[in-house]
Image (cartoon, rainbow, N blue to C red):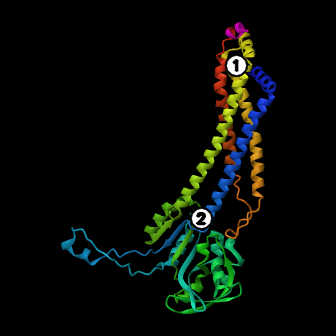
């Protein structure tokens, strides 16, 4: 039979029981709406949580790690060369933590086209003097301009301006928790003591808040030159180089390359933050599982409605087959009905899903631990909408195929004789 005729018959059956059709379409619409909203929200949440760490983490970190010295005297003795050595309490290597030939490495990285940018870093353990109490803290020497460009540092400065670290000598940005302990604000002066007992006074030019409380209670930031001055070190003294790549997927391979090339320790972002990637994968898997379950439930609704329609339309099906329609034609009619419900409900669900996601995106979300977040996070990735309509089509197709197959096997002689 001609497809247009089959579609017209399917349309007549659809509108003959329009209430049941509407209920089935609403089921698909609700499922797609929740599928889109759930994935958009959970993906946005994943981006938010990962961003708190990954945005502040270099793709590759170059540094000199503290390791036990492998060159022990017993290894030099030829008579014990084939023996297994048991050595306890091995002390660390006497090498310094600073990076050798740091200027040459920085120049080499600047020429590497795979590198988006880099930022030198220097970390010092210090004590903040609060009267007779010394509060343990960490001071990070950074290049504020590059740190803001590559690692969004300025986004987490809730008061003041990170650029002041280079404009104002002997200045510092304190973590908000640390500033609360010291009861200081912008413009105040804090006194710090190094591990060697030297004291310095630094002017507070900003407050920093990462959203991780334990981090904000101890961390502070100053320019690299200020930290070098506090540690009494030369201008080429840095303890790490933070590298940002054009393609993050190259990080593991390039980290190994840099280790061999520069004879330095290199850690890629995938190794440093594997637990965050695992958490994101699990949350995404849960979102997809719940969304697909909703679509399957809607498919069962369509299946039941088509089964009822077939039971009620036995006479019509018998007449169709008696007048020359084949079993395949009857099956196609009911498949067209199911697909029509799926496509209509799916498209409306996409619109409602986008609308609900946009509504959630406007709901205020203000918390002291996340100063950069103003509303609930939503990810409007088109991939979610494509997946939603595809699953809607597949689910409704199979929901219609089984009852359609049943209808195609109806014997018109048995039905007409029974009547």
If the image is split into quadrants, where does the C terminus sit? top right
Q: Residues within 10 Å of mark 1 (few under 14, many from 20)?
A: many
Which callout, 2 or 1, points to the residue nearer the camera? 1
Cα–Cα span, label 2 and label 1: 56 Å
Instruction: Give above or below for 404 relative to 323.
Output: below
Residue 341: x %, y % from top left: 74, 32
From which residue to which does the magenta span run?
414-419
**Secondary-structure class at tag 2:** helix
> What residue is shown at x 52% (from left), y 80% (from top)?
238
Asked which quadrant contains residue 279, the reply is bottom right
Residue drawn 71% across the image and 46% down it: 34
Task: Give the labeled residue for mark 1.
Answer: 330
Q: Quadrant of the N terminus?
A: top right
Tag 2 residue: 54
Classify 173 as above or below 252.
below
Indicate yes or no whether the magenta region holds residue 415: yes
Residue 151, position as x, y percentages in the image: 62, 69
Neighbour tally class for label 2: few under 14, some 14-19, many 20 plus, Cα within 10 Å: some
- Camera-side residue: 316 or 166? 316
Q: Where residue 330 appears, x then y in whole percent?
A: 70, 19
State whether residue 381 appears in this view.
Answer: no
User: Measuring 64% from the left and 85% from the top, which residue is drawn there?
Assistant: 182
């Amino acid at each position: 039979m001609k497809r247009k005729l089959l579609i017209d018959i399917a349309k007549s059956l659809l509108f003959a029981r329009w209430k049941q059709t509407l209920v089935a379409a609403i089921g698909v619409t609700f499922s797609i709406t929740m599928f889109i909203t759930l994935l958009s929200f959970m993906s946005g949440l994943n981006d938010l949580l990962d961003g708190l760490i990954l945005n502040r983490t270099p793709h590759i970190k170059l540094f000199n790690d503290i390791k036990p010295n492998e060159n022990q005297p017993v290894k030099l003795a030829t008579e014990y060369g084939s023996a297994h050595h048991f050595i306890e309490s091995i002390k660390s290597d006497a090498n310094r933590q600073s990076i050798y030939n740091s200027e040459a490495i920085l120049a080499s990285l600047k020429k590497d086209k795979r590198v988006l940018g880099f930022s030198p870093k220097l970390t010092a353990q210090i004590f903040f003097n609060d009267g007779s109490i010394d509060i343990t803290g960490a001071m990070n020497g950074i290049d504020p301009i590059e740190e803001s460009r590559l690692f969004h540092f300025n986004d987490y400065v809730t008061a003041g301006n990170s650029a002041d670290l280079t404009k104002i000598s002997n200045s510092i940005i304190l973590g908000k928790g640390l500033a609360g302990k010291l009861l200081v604000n912008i413009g105040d002066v804090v006194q710090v003591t190094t591990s060697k007992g030297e004291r310095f006074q630094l002017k507070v030019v900003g407050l920093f808040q990462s959203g991780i409380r334990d981090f904000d209670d101890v961390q502070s930031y100053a320019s690299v030159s200020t930290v070098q001055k506090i540690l009494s070190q030369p201008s080429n003294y840095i303890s790490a180089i933070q590298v940002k790549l054009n393609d993050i997927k190259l990080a593991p391979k390039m980290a190994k390359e840099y280790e061999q090339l520069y004879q330095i320790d290199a850690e890629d972002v995938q190794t440093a933050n594997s637990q965050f990637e695992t958490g994101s994968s699990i949350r995404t898997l849960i979102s997809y599982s719940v969304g697909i379950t909703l679509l399957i439930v809607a498919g069962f609704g369509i299946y039941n409605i088509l089964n009822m329609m077939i039971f009620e339309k036995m006479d019509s099906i018998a007449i169709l087959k008696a007048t020359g329609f084949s079993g395949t034609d009857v099956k196609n009619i009911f498949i067209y009905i199911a697909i029509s419900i799926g496509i209509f409900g799916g498209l409306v669900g996409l619109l409602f899903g986008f609308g609900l996601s946009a509504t959630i995106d406007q709901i205020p979300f203000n918390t002291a631990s996340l100063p950069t977040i103003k509303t609930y996070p939503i990810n409007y990735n088109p991939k979610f909408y494509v997946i939603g309509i595809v699953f809607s089509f597949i689910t409704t197709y199979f929901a219609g195929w089984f009852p359609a197959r049943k209808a195609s096997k109806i014997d018109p002689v048995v039905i007409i004789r029974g009547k």
